[in-house]
Image (cartoon, rainbow, N blue to C red):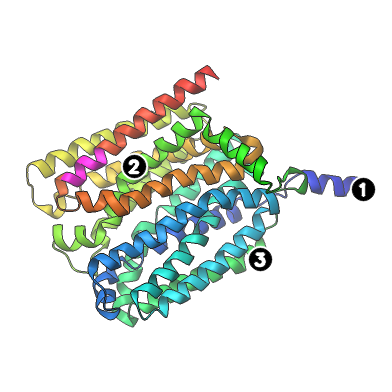
């Protein structure tokens, strides 16, 4: 074997920073678009598919549960066959699921398409993050994660606004055709611009025993579990409002179905600002301090949110004041928590990325199925729920720090 061949098998192929940032952000945004783009169409879809509002609401669960169940496998599969193949296959399946939703004539067919979207959407989220750590290290990896987070933060604002206008112009089915177009575009980009970043020599076979042992090792590591829970909790704090958007915007804020921007634009402004702060802070050598500063911002947001809702202030704009502040704090934590978690298991970052996102997505599913319905009746309940989730995230990060110091 030549020295050139040996190098190719052992070292990952380099990616240009703009390429990896756009790709990973696009792959991550696709999953968010699948959640938020069709929210404005709930009432019209219920009428068209002869379904109840509750049945349409459960189409979120039909997406989130398969997403959560498949996330642990995407990383392990990419560790075995390479990153590029799983990205291509995942986006093709997502496009097919989107077309099924667009063609649905009953609620059961909509659920089937949503389930296929959920099965495949996680591939890009998981593998994209693993690709960053395949190719970049240290400060550079933190900065790229922060840039990805900054672009990704646009998704919750853009998605429902796009969905609202597509609904108005061409009907609800065009929303799912739009999602199919986005995933097909990512297939083209990946095919022509993205090389394989995981060398053959660094791959791990999908042997059931070794895979089970790897899962056991990872979830048996208290530091990793605590970091994953710390991330999931703060994300759920903002997801309460994303998943409850149809009721929150129309009922609590008293706005119309083309007005989702009033909720999502302030949130996204905070997310982008927080990601910008994280990007600037990346590389200062003190990830723990940055995470704690993010939690300080979220505590301030929680106090504001509970106070204005407890005083029964006018929903517009007071119900929205704290959300961008919370978004700033949340995004200040994200790149640092991700890097710390993936570095708990550096020899199998695909698997680590899968398990990290699995915890978050299972939380999203439980929130959609149980937590949101419980808190949906009152903006004060939602504010309290957000504060409790943030507090739990802070406790979990402190637990992770303690275990990090003991290792």
Residue most toward the front?
209
Query: How far from the left and from the top, in percent, is residue 256?
Result: 18, 68
What main secondary structure does the magenta stretch of the protein show?
Answer: helix
Is residue 399 toward the left or the right of residue 210 in the image? left
C-beta proximity under 8 Å, tags 2 and 3: no
Instruction: State which quarter of the image contains the C terminus.
Output: top right
Specify the quadrant of the image occupied by residue 211: top right
Residue at the spot of label 3: 191
Residue at the spot of label 1: 2
Residue at the spot of label 2: 328
Name which residue lies at 44% across and 40% down: 334
C-beta proximity under 8 Å, tags 1 and 2: no
Specify the quadrant of the image occupied by residue 172: bottom left
Q: Is residue 134 above or below residue 159?
A: above
Bounds of the magenta segment: 381-387
Query: How far from the left and from the top, in percent, is residue 11?
Result: 76, 44
Query: How far from the left and from the top, in percent, is residue 289?
Result: 42, 26
Q: Is residue 113 above or below residue 245?
A: below
Under circle 3, the secondary element is: helix
Whether residue 253 is visible: no
State the CA–CA distance, disc 2 to disc 3.
35 Å
Name which residue lies at 37% across and 64% down: 159
């Amino acid at each position: 074997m030549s020295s050139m061949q040996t190098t190719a098998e052992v070292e990952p192929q380099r990616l240009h920073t703009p390429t990896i940032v756009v790709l990973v952000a696009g792959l991550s945004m696709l999953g968010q678009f699948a959640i938020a783009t069709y929210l404005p169409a709930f009432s019209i879809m219920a009428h068209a598919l002869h379904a109840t509002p509750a049945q349409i609401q459960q189409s979120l669960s039909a997406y989130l549960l398969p997403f959560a169940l498949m996330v642990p496998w995407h990383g392990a599969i990419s560790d075995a066959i390479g990153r590029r193949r799983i990205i291509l296959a995942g986006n093709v399946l997502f496009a097919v699921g989107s077309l099924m939703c667009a063609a649905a004539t009953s609620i059961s067919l909509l659920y089937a398409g949503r389930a296929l979207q959920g099965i495949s959407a996680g591939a890009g989220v998981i593998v994209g993050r693993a690709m960053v750590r395949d190719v970049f290290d240290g400060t550079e990896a933190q900065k790229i994660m922060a840039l990805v987070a900054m672009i990704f933060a646009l998704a919750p604002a853009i998605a429902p606004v796009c969905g609202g206008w597509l609904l108005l112009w061409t009907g609800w089915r065009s929303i799912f055709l739009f999602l199919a177009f986005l995933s097909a575009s990512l297939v083209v980009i990946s095919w022509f611009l993205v090389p394989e970043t995981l060398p053959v020599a660094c791959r791990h076979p999908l042997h059931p025993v070794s895979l089970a042992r790897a899962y056991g090792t990872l979830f048996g590591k208290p530091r990793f579990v605590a970091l994953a829970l710390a991330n999931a909790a703060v994300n759920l704090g903002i997801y309460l409002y994303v998943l409850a958007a149809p009721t929150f915007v129309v009922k609590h804020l008293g706005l119309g179905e083309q007005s989702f921007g009033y909720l999502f634009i302030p949130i996204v402004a905070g997310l982008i600002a927080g990601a910008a702060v994280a990007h600037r802070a990346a590389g200062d050598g003190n990830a723990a301090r940055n995470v704690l500063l993010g939690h300080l911002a979220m505590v301030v947001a929680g106090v504001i949110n509970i106070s204005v809702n407890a005083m029964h202030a006018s929903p517009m704009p007071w119900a929205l004041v704290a959300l961008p502040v919370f978004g700033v704090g949340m995004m200040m934590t994200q790149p640092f928590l991700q890097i710390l978690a993936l570095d708990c298991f550096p020899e199998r970052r695909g698997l680590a990325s899968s398990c990290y996102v699995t915890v978050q997505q299972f939380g999203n599913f439980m929130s959609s199925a149980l937590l949101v319905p419980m808190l949906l009746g009152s903006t004060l309940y939602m504010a309290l729920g957000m504060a409790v989730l943030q507090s739990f995230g802070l406790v979990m990060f402190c637990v992770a720090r303690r275990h990090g110091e003991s290792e």
